[in-house]
Each structure stands twice: as C-alpha cells, then as structure tokens.
Amino acid sequence: MVTTSKKGAEKTKAKARNRSLKKSQVKQARTTEALRRERDEALEQLAAASDILRMLARSPTNLQPVLDAIAESAAKRCDAADAVVWRVDGDVFRLASHSRAAFSATASSTGCKSAGELAIMRRMSAVAVSRASDSSRARCND
C-alpha cells in the first residue's frame, strides 16, 4: 500500500496552482496589451475625425481644405505615401484631392509649378464610371 504525506500532496497542489497562476497572468498581460492597442487606435480615429470636423467648422463654404484634410489624414492613418479623394460628377470621377506628399510627386511628374496649376489639372482629370474598377463598381451598384 502506498501512502503520501500531507506535505507532498500540498507541494504538488501548490506547484499546480503556481503554473495555473502564471498562465493566467500571461493571458491577462496579452489581453491588456490588445486592449491598449484597440484604445490607441480608437483615439487616433477620433483625433482624425475631430481634425476633419474642425476643418469643416473653419470653412463651411469651401470644400477643398476639407478634402485636403481627408486625404492627408487617410495617408497618415494608413502609413501611405499617397491618398487620393475622388468626387463623383455625373458619370465620371474627378480628382478632388490628394495628400501633400503626393502633391510634390504629381506636380513634378506633370510639370505643374504651383498649386494653381495643379488645381487646373485636377479639374481636367476625370475617370469614367464603369465596372472596370472596385470604386466604379461600388458607384454603379448604388
């Protein structure tokens, strides 16, 4: 017959509790970190929305600064080199705005020397709404 002492059984139970506690602490630390990341992302989204709403309040009759702020915010939020905002005008998409980082590249590639020249180029650039691209298909399905 095998018998165990109370001390041996208590040590085994204590070790099991310690392992369980460590696993629980690790799981809790991971959950805490995930929640912090979610919180930080939500705060970034709120800050971007706040900036755009502030821009709307500053110039309620001038849409261009708002579209520029949206493009800048999108590029920053997505860590992108470029962000473009298109405006639907009848059966075409017209370039409404893009981020400043793209402005210098676009201006140099098109030969534009100023924002005024680029504004003229924007008015002239149009893409037909068709089922050829995702954004066009989204517009066609409205």
Image (spheres, rainbow, N blue to C red):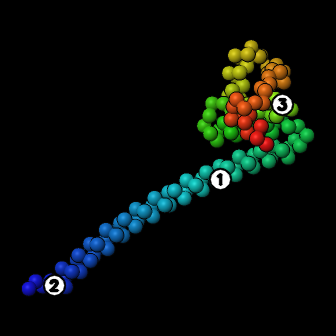
Which residue corresponds to mark 3? Answer: 91
Q: Amino acid at mark 3?
A: Asp
Q: Position of residue 17 (x, y in %)?
A: 32, 74
Residue under the image location 70 percent in, 29 percent down:
132
Q: Amino acid at mark 1?
A: Leu
Is 113 situated above or below 86?
A: above
CA distance for labels 1 and 3: 37 Å
CA distance for labels 1 and 2: 57 Å
Q: Quadrant of the N terminus?
A: bottom left
Tell me the element at label 3. Answer: loop
Q: Position of residue 71 (x, y in %)?
A: 72, 36
Q: Residues within 10 Å of mark 3 (few under 14, many from 20)?
A: some
CA distance for labels 3 and 2: 86 Å
Looking at the image, residue 54 sits to the left or right of residue 72; the answer is right
Q: Residues within 10 Å of mark 1 (few under 14, many from 20)?
A: few
Which residue corresponds to mark 2? Answer: 5
Q: Residues within 10 Å of mark 2 (few under 14, many from 20)?
A: few
Residue under the image location 66 percent in, 30 percent down:
82
Tell me the element at label 2. Answer: loop
Which residue corresponds to mark 1? Answer: 43
